[in-house]
Image: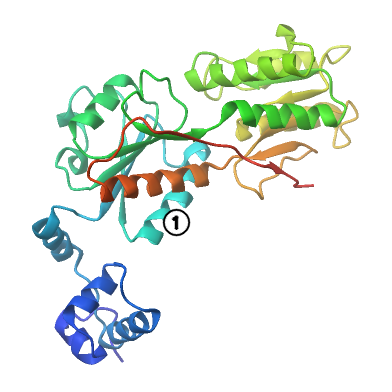
Amino acid sequence: MVSFMNEETSIRDVADKSGFSIATVSRILNRKPGASAATQKKVLAACEALGYRLNPAIQDLARKGWNRDTNNLVFVIAGKAFSDPAYSGALDGIARGINEFGYNLALAGISGKEKNIYELPPLLREGRFDGIIITGNLSRNIMILMEKLEKPHVVLGVYSDEIVKNANCIRLNITKTIAKLVNALKRKGKKRIAYFTEYSDSFYEMRCLDAFKLELKRNKLVVDKRIIFCGKGAFSGAVSLLGPVLDGPSIPFDSIVCLNFRCAQEICYLILSRYGIKNEIGILPATLSVMSNYKLPIPAVYCNGIIDEIAYMGVKTLIMMLKDKGYSHNLKLELTPDLLDLE
């Protein structure tokens, strides 16, 4: 029985057993194009039979010696956790991208308050990577540090032009997303549409709220400031803002848009606690779904959050930048989600 890894086996042994050249074996193991499916199958079968595995350290040194590339991409999150539902979905899209294009992935968390490159994690400041995908609480100073690293980088998310003015950016098309949710509610007979966000001052949330107001006006629906609820930051909660309204003698809205899925869940459980599972007041939430199989506990309207697709396109864009050493700057690619039928 062959062990999982045989350190004495070399790439030459694999070439001899498979009947192909060392160059062909190397091309296949490094996921480079040019070999047929049949050839790949034979080479990989030889690797398995011999217990051969690549030595990552040797491969890294070899690539640097050949073309200065490491075959490593770094996913950087500033001021947020990788476990945050708003960002964890991006890992699925990034994983799909690196597997498809044959790269390795490293993760780097930063505070977002770094002032110079020496405060960055060693992986970043030592340049042991080819390109960066970055998101989170970004500032102009953080983006300047990314530029100083002199490596291609792609931003995921909606930020002001000042922050990402020199960066390629993949982001959600807010205007079209809000339009789909509002129009879906209108088709269901909803006329008094409220809005909830935990934030009131982030660029993304302000853009969302502006788009919501414009879409109401475009549909000749009432824009009522009394049913636009803005919290005071992450996890400030819907209970304090919406609880007194739901306890009142009459409810001033018949539906509510909340793009944050976690907040939408909180709103739904608040409704259930007041009115039970029948939800006799008929409030219909509208939100971005974290994943297409995530559902709220009461009937709702959903758009696919597509964070995985945005992240995948981030990887694809970064690979294109790496292959074209004269890569372009200031690409702003916007993706629009589809309405989902999860009932």
**Quarter of the image with the N terminus in it:** bottom left
Q: How is the image coloured?
A: rainbow
Q: Is residue 231 visible?
A: yes
Residue 253 vs residue 173, the one in the foreground: 173
Residue 328 x %, y %:
31, 36
Residue 259 vs residue 148, the one in the foreground: 148
Residue 157 x %, y %:
46, 32
Say left or right for 128 vs 173. left
Say left or right for 28 vs 174. left
Residue 25 x %, y %:
23, 78
| Crowdedness near tag 1: few (<14), some (14–19) or many (≥20) residues, C-alpha within 10 Å | some
Residue 262 vs residue 318, the one in the foreground: 318
Residue for point 33% across, 83% down:
39
Residue for point 51% across, 22% down:
204
Numbered circles on residues, count: 1
Residue 220 vs residue 163, the one in the foreground: 220
Say left or right for 200 vs 191. left
Instruction: Say which quarter of the image contains residue 136.
Output: top left
Say left or right for 105 vs 231. left
Residue for point 11% across, 60% down:
66
Instruction: Say which quarter of the image contains residue 299.
Output: top right
Of the residues shown, which amino acid type is indicated by label 1?
Arg
Which residue was labeled with disc 1? 96
Q: Residue furthest left?
A: 65
Residue 186 x %, y %:
82, 26
| Residue 288 position (above or below residue 212) | below
| Residue 15 position (above or below residue 29) | below
Q: Is residue 273 visible?
A: no
| Residue 28 position (above or below residue 301) | below
Residue for point 29% across, 26% down:
143
